[in-house]
Image (tube, grey):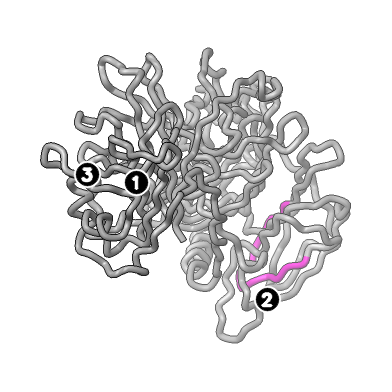
Amino acid sequence: MKTLKLIFLVFVSFNSFGQSWEKEEVFAHISKNISLVNDHIWFYLSVSNDGQASPSKIAYAEIIDRESFPVFQLIVPLNHGKAEGVLTIPPHLESDHYLLRFYTRISPLNEKSGKGVFNQMITVINPKKGPITIKPKQTRNNYAFEQAKTLQIPENTVKKNSEVKIPITYSQNLHHVSIALKNPFLPEDYQGFAGQEIYYPLEQNNRVIPELYGHIIHGKTLDSEVDTTETFFLSAHGRQSVLNSAKPDHEGNMFFELGPLKAYDFLIAQSLNYEKQLNFAPQSPFWNLRLKDDFIFPTLELNEKDREFLEVLILSAQLNPHFIPEKAPEPQPIATGLVADKTYFLDDYSRFENMETTLREYVPEVLVRRQNRKPVFKLLNSPLNGLFQENPLILIDAMPIFDTDALAKFDPKDIEKLEVLTREFSFNEDKFAGVLSLTSFQNDFGKFELPTNSLYLNYWPILKPKKLKTPHFNPNIGVANYPDFRSCLIWHTAQSAEQLHFYTSEITGKYEITVSFFNENGMPQSFKTNLEVID
């Protein structure tokens, strides 16, 4: 059931945050460092603050090209400082090396340790767009990537299409494991991960608000003269909907808190001064981290001798979406900020062709009147046993409606329920004469048209939760006539067994085993070794 949520923004100062905003550290483990476009890279993200799980609720993922331009950006919800998800490599990317980075709203401020931004090189292959020949100013990497330690295993050669069990010596820790085809194109001195030392220092006087309750959207009014009393509404819509409001400061900045909402498809911005043209622009939530000029991307060179490897990579990527299922958990219900005094499920009544008649016939808490030839919906004021004289806050799937004439003529055939709050309603800094809230069956506004002078926004995407049905990717290993061309053999983010248990596929060649965990001091540790899969 779709539910309306009203979210209230709470500004948190760094003092109340315990002065620990300079101690936020980010670590990531990815399933592989070479991928085709449209293919997936799974990741595990851990964010700590002063040695404990970070209270931050949002992280950010970006893929950066060699011109320091972000070609992919994603908002990642955190749960107790952790996140697991999948990045889909955009189809427009050219074949090249890219920088994958993770951070939170406040972690780049941890410049002293350099651990506030996690960076790792990945290689992207686009069969339709070969690499552009680049002659770098210098060929030597000036920045040392932190290399994984060597993982000791008794046997480094196994057969294809076989079950493998390898004992490991780090079973005292919950560890994360990936086994994937080794990237033959990324130079060894670019393997591993780098910190914040590859970026120029941050600009001073950054205005940063820790995201302790959820994602905070920064908007800005473009009016030449800012009215600091004007109320702006921002509603987020998807399987669930939320509404927030804010007033601009003297520079036109305003901030909207999405709270626990972890998924949306689009946003709608409006002003309480709905008759004027809306001048509103969302600001990027991502940091403008500038790579230093002497940080050089390695050159990607593809030759005829690489054809066989690339054909195998392409085959694996083409088959995976068809034969490797994923599951997306249902979104968790969010507590609503609106407690209705009366709820009407419209299927319990005979339906009328417009909302005005429906309210007149079935909803005694709403009196429909006409003023200056326009309908006015006056709600009962239950505490005072009277009647409000102004229109209430009217919502359809959390989207404010100010055009009462359009609402009166609206056919509610796709509206599931109607909720009425017959008391003064305080919403952030504004007070309303009650609330009249409509909820549609499909969370699509019941086909109500987008209000005039509203702004439809395709905001930056937020990670949609997905999980593999099995850490081996293939749930039908050993099943006849079921193709198994996995280039990634295992992805396990919470393994505690004393051995690596996995199954090889049809693909032979060099693989890389990566194991990471946090030691007793809370420090991330990474170990790697090569594995040869033979016929």
The residue segment tinted magenta is 501-514
- The first of marks 2 and 1 along the sequence is 2
User: Which residue is disc 1 drawn over?
Assistant: 395
Residue at image coords 48%, 32%:
286
Image quarter in which the C terminus is found = bottom right
Residue 76 vertical position relative to residue 352 in the rendered view, above or below: above
User: Which residue is disc 2 drawn over?
Assistant: 161
Is 221 displayed left or right of 31 in the figure?
Answer: left
Categorize mark 2 by other alpha carbons within 10 Å: few (<14), some (14-19), many (20+): some
The three-letter code of the residue at mark 2 reads Asn
Give residue 253's position: percent from left, percent from top: 40, 22
Give residue 479's position: percent from left, percent from top: 62, 83
Is 196 displayed left or right of 305 in the figure?
Answer: right
How much space separates mark 1 and mark 3, taking CA atoms?
11 Å
Task: Report if residue 204 is visible in the image.
Answer: yes
Say which element carries label 2.
loop
